[in-house]
Amino acid sequence: MFNDIGPLELVTLIVLAVLIFGPEKLPKVIQDVTRTIRKIRDFSESAKQDIRQELGPEFKDFEFEDLNPKTFIRKQLDNDDLGLKEIRNGFDLKKEMAEVADSVHGRDSDPSPSPAPSGGRVDMTKKPEQPAADDRPPFDMDAT
């Protein structure tokens, strides 16, 4: 319940509780708070039992933690009835993303180097090719 409270925060809470309630009333307040928490837990457990009884024997394996999407997905991935582990292990996300990026940028997905012209030397005096005026992408007036 208090997994994310550090030691300094805990000391601060204790000091604040002593200052607010005083050392005489603090034990009574702690008892009241623990009693209330216990009642809430008992109420939630009885509600869970009532729901399980109402659902019937078909849902005897039903766990309320499965209603959390992360828990449900993790449980389904661990259950290998559908062969999901093979699919997950055979899927290389980095490779797929690189292929998508290459196709978007119009690059060839084969990373083999192209041969350099003129015997391995590159002519730096030659200007790069400019696309023709007809090769420009279409202009959409409504998009601007």
Image (cartoon, grey):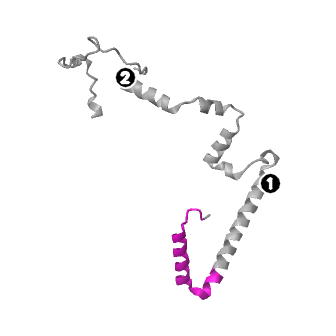
Q: Secondary structure at mark 1?
A: helix
Q: Residue, x 52% and y 83% (percent of image)?
A: 19
- Picture coordinates of residue 96, whole percent (x, y): 49, 29
Q: Amino acid at mark 1?
A: Gln
Q: Amino acid at mark 2?
A: Gly
Snapshot quadrant of residue 88? top right
- Picture coordinates of residue 87, whole percent (x, y): 62, 30
Q: Residue, x 68% and y 43% (percent of image)?
A: 75
Q: Residue, x 68% and y 40% (percent of image)?
A: 78
Q: Is residue 28 magenta?
A: yes
Of badges 1 and 2, nearer the viewer stands 2
Q: Which residue is at the front of the view, 126 or 37?
A: 126
Q: Residue, x 51% and y 75% (percent of image)?
A: 12
- Residue picked out by circle 1: 53
Residue 2 shows which numbered tag? none
Q: Quadrant of the N terminus?
A: bottom right
Region in magenta: 2-29
Q: Is residue 93 above or below residue 54?
A: above
Q: Which residue is at the front of the view, 19 or 61?
A: 19
Question: Sequence-wise, which precedes: disc 1 or disc 2?
Answer: 1
Q: Is residue 106 left or right of residue 59?
A: left
Q: Which residue is at the front of the view, 1 or 66?
A: 1
Q: Is residue 116 magenta?
A: no
Q: Quadrant of the C terminus?
A: top left
- Residue picked out by circle 2: 106
Q: Is residue 107 above or below residue 9?
A: above
Q: Residues within 10 Å of mark 1 (few under 14, many from 20)?
A: few
Snapshot quadrant of residue 49? bottom right
